[in-house]
Each structure stands twice: as structure tokens, then as C-alpha cells.
Image (cartoon, helix red, strand yellow):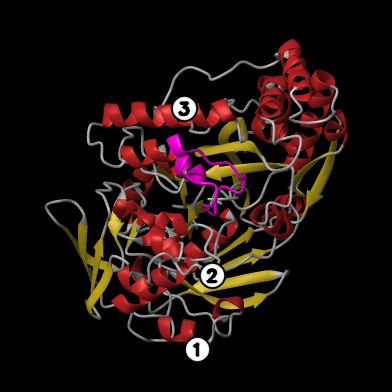
Amino acid sequence: MKNIKYTALVLMSMALLFTGCSNPKDKKTKPHSYQAAKQTLRINICTEPGTLDPRKARALNDINVIKMLQEGLTRINFEGSVKLALAENIELSEDQKTYTIKIKDARWSNGDAITSYDFAHAWKKALSPTFPAPNANLLYFIRNAQKVKEGLLPSSMLGVTTPDTETLVVKLDKPAPFFKELLASPTYFPVHSITDKTIPSWSDNAETYISCGPFKLKSWKHSNNLVVEKNEGYFDQDEVKLQEIHMCMVSAETGFNMYQNGELDWEGSPLSLLPLDAMDTLKENNQLKTQAVLSTTFLRTNIRKAPFNSEKVRKAFAYALDRKTIINDLLSGHPDFATGLVPKVMGLRKEEYFTDNQSEDVKRLVESAINDSSISRRDLNKIKLTFISREKNYRLAQVLQQQIKENLGVDLELDPVEAQVYFSRISSQDYQITISSWEADFRDPINFLEVFKTRDVGTNNTNWGNDNYLAMLEKSYDIQNMTERMALLKECEALLIDEMPIIPLFHGKMHYVKNSKVRDVVFSQSGGIDFKWAFIDNK
């Protein structure tokens, strides 16, 4: 979430993943005037947040809003480095498996001290078998976490202890060199444990919401607007320049019109979507800004529902598409089509797994599936493509519908639904095929591959699983040689694509426009956006 956002990230020696919207050098060499300007940022988040509980968040917009309101033990700073946040210091044992973390003297928005118990409580609750934490598998690096989530062990066996209110000891099953970056993700955020126990719905309304991040919740008119204000009790409040962030919830088209009328300071990714018809004009006028992201858009299939119970049919759909046409005609020259799950910039592979437009082969695959009784011809007459009802998705769905009809002779029924309905159907596997995506939580191929680690993991939802795939992923945790590790992860991806529970389409690039006076926004390749350091420059 991402639409469904996990991974590992030590391998990449690429340019900084996190870059500010303004030039970091400007920040250091030019004095800016933010005191004289009205420090209110206006943005559009399109729809009502599904949740503002960091443990329950799945959609990218929900995660971005939560990062305004909450803080983790670490945070990704303006330069893209992992820095201590609520952690005063972190000590790592010689075997690289035990983290002893001292908690800062920091406060919740209600004035209470943030304690180690708040972290332990949040993580254990997220790992409760009945608690809806779609990204709980990010916690599985902690000793016994997966067994606790599966109900095989009590939460008391989780590798987390709290010797005192200021100390958190975390034991991992295996070394995870990316663990400090993981601590910056919402799944690892604390919650106010007393409130969580007494008011389980605390995150649903401004009146009961308690935060510990750069901002606190000022007002929340559901399905209308959400306002956050600077949290004066935040431990690092001197770094926070914005006084308020106003978030409206309107369509992308309305939001773009508001931006053009000077009513919004930012429109487009990752908070909203720019109208596709406006992209060329914005590019010509040098207004369009882009950001490469570690994400993959793909078709998720339900392998327990015909016709996608047939691997041959899944492959036929994959091979029938013309991704370059989709990119050039629909996505304004998006740079990278996908035949695999892991973005190529992560270094897992150079070659493609298959080629497009295999018009004759795809028909043979379908006929073969019918002949071996995997499916019937009737199964091909009632295929429903489900997707979140947004302009970009709708256009993509129409192109897919056309290409599948031309190359396979199969009709797709388009099924656009609201985001909450979409995620509900995905979680309950109430679909045949959907448009889906995954944004990296951290910089490592395993963050993508673990999405489909087992058929029961909350991020999978395809009903696909493979014991060899699981065994290779598990083995990769113990490999210290990075070349060997990458080779094994490549085998994992190759197996996934060979059995094709998902059909890759393209890798990510986000487009947005912004008020030129908005400075120092951190925009990451994982699709995240951080306004902690942002300000309105009055010069």
C-alpha cells in the first residue's frame, strides 16, 4: 500500500532515494524567509483516509498523512539518510540480532511521556491474529513475530522486552541490515497504549486522536477536509516551519482546477493524480515535475477463480499485452515497462522475463487450457477487471480491455469501485483480476518479493503460494555475500513470474505540480512525501 504496501534495502548504491523538491544545496547556501510568509500548506488527498492508525494503514495516502502525525524511532531526513527520531540511541549486538534502544524524553500530543511500552503494545497488538494490520509482515523480522501473528505462540514470546519505560530491547530471528530504516515505517510506530486500550476507536476522530509527530490533528470533517497543525510538543519542533496543512478531499480534476486557481499549493502524486489530458501542456510549460519511484503496477489474479486458476491463461494474458504502447500512449512516456515484480534499478536483473505481443502463442495457451479441462470456454465470457475508480486506472483498464480483446478475443467487464470497496474485495479475495500496485517500504528486492511470501500473508491475496519460493526467501536472510543473495532473490522472482499469479505492467514514476514557493518537501522513491521540513518561501 502502499495501494499495498516490504523488503530489504542494504544493497543499493544508487543515488539518494529521498530527494527534496527543492535543491538541498539551496537549503544550505541561500537564506530563505519563511517567518514573513503565511505558513499554511494546501493540498488535496482526494478521498477520506481509510484509517489514521499506523498499524492499520495500507493505502499510500493514509501512510503519508500518518507520517505527518506520528513519529518512529528513526526517520528519513532531508538528505535521504536514516536518522534517530524518538530513539536517543540504538546499540546493536555483536551477532547483529539484538537492538537495545533508548527512548528520547518526548511527549504525546496530550502531554504524556512516550514510553517503550507504547512501542511494545503497538507491535504486539498489530501481531494479534485478529487485528487487521495489512503490513504486519514488516514486523516478521522480530523473533517469533510471524508465529505470534499466526496464533502459534502467545505475544509474550515476541522478541520485544521493556526493561524500563525508556528502554526497548528488540531481538531479531536473523540479521537485518536494513532494520533501522524499517523502524521509520508506520508499522513500527508507537501508539498511546492507555488510550488504545480504553478507546479502541481513538484514531477515527480528531477529538480522540493522539499523536507524537511534527503535526497534530486540528480538525477532521469526514469525507470533506482534514487540518493538521504544528505540534508544539514535538521533540524536534524547531525544525517544523509549517503552522498548518489543509487537506481537502476532492477529485483529481477538481483539485487540478483548484491548483490552477491558486487554491492549492500542490497537486498530483503521491497525494492525488494529475489529469492525463493536462500532462503534455504542463510538460511544454516546464510546470510538470517528476519523481522516479520504487513501485510496480501489475494485474493481481485470483488463482482460485476461473479462468485464472489456469497458469496457461495467466500467461496468455501477460503475453498478449503491448506494454510499450500502454506507456507511450497512456502514461506520457513512462520510462520502464515491467515483466518482473522488482524494479530494475534495484539491480536484480537486466534481461526481461518474456516478450509482448505473442499473439499466436497466447491463443495456443488458452486452447491448451481448455483442452486439458483447466477451464471452459464459458469461463472466458465473464471476466471482471476490478480497479479503484480513478481516471488513470480507468484509462489503463480501457487499454487493457482493448488489447485483450484484440489478441485473445476475450471480453473484459470493467468494474471501477471506490478505494475502500476495492481493498475490502482484495482482502476477501472477492475478485477475478484487479489493477494493483506495490510501493517499496525500504530499498531492497525482498520488500517486493515478500509481498507474495505465502498465500496467507496479508499483502498477497492471490491465493498463490509455493514452498520453493518460501524456502529461497528464508535462505536469503542468512546469506551475507550480497552477490549470492541477489542471485537467489532473482531465482525467487523468476519462479514468481513463471507461475504468474501477478501480471507485471510497468514500474513507477510520479508526476506533480507545486507552488514554486513551497520548499524543502522530502519526496521519496518509495512514494512517500514528508512535510516535516517544508515551508513557504516569501522571497
Residue 34 seen: no
Left or right: where does residue 251 sit relative to residue 340?
right
Left or right: where does residue 23 sit relative to residue 358?
left
Q: Is residue 452 magenta?
A: yes
> Horizontal and vertical percent for residue 21?
48, 46
The residue to which callout 1 is attached is: 198
Disc 2: CA contacts within 10 A as few (<14), some (14-19) or many (>=20): few
The residue to which callout 2 is attached is: 130
Q: Is residue 529 magenta?
A: no
Q: Nearer the viewer, residue 439 or 27?
A: 439
Q: Quadrant of residue 155?
A: bottom left
Whole-number angstrom distance, CA of label 2 to CA of label 1: 18 Å
**In the image, residue 277 above or below residue 390:** above
Q: Quadrant of residue 240?
A: bottom left
Q: Nearer the viewer, mark 2 or mark 1?
A: 2
Disc 1: CA contacts within 10 A as few (<14), some (14-19) or many (>=20): few
Whole-number angstrom distance, CA of label 3 to CA of label 1: 47 Å
Q: Secondary structure at mark 3?
A: helix
Amino acid type, residue under disc 2 in the picture: Thr
Q: Nearer the viewer, residue 510 or 418?
A: 418
The residue to which callout 3 is attached is: 344
Q: Secondary structure at mark 1?
A: helix
Whole-number angstrom distance, CA of label 3 to CA of label 2: 36 Å
